[in-house]
Amino acid sequence: MAEFGVRPMVIVNQPVSAQKRDWNTGLCDCCADLGICCCGMCCTLCLGCQIAGNMNECCLCGTSMAMRTLIRAKYNITGSLCSDWWTTMCCLPCSLCQIKRELNYLN
């Protein structure tokens, strides 16, 4: 192309899609849905599998930081990889409950 005088286009900025938003409920808003809260506290793995099923992912992925990051990216929710890691490491049941409430709200 350079031989015809056409210069290749160089992209210097990543395109911005939709504006970021916050989660619909807070991390510790268990009263927002007591059924989800009970499931998350009594059977964390079951709730993780439900979340993975909602996202058409492997059941074992439901309780991972990657699942939280995937949902944040898909629905333009504010946060970072670091915050996802801390949230899943420090309070996995609360994280899963928040994710499930978000998915229920959006679907």
Image: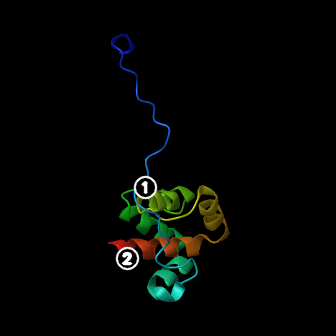
97 shown above or below 53: below
The residue sitting at the top extreme is 3
- In which image quadrant can residue 5 be found? top left
Q: Where is residue 104 in the image (x, y as percent from the top left)?
A: 37, 75
Labelled pair 2, 1 in contact (Cβ < 8 Å):
no
- In which image quadrant can residue 100 be found? bottom left
Q: Residue at x 41, y 29 (%)?
A: 9
Q: Which residue is drawn at 51% across and 58% down?
A: 69
In this view, the residue in front, 81 or 12, is: 12
Which residue is tagged 2?
A: 105
| Number of numbered discs on residues | 2
Q: Where is residue 10 in the image (x, y as percent from the top left)?
A: 45, 31
Horizontally, residue 69 falls left or right of residue 51, namely right
Tell me the tag on residue 29.
none
Horizontally, residue 20 falls left or right of residue 85, namely left
Which residue is tagged 1?
A: 58
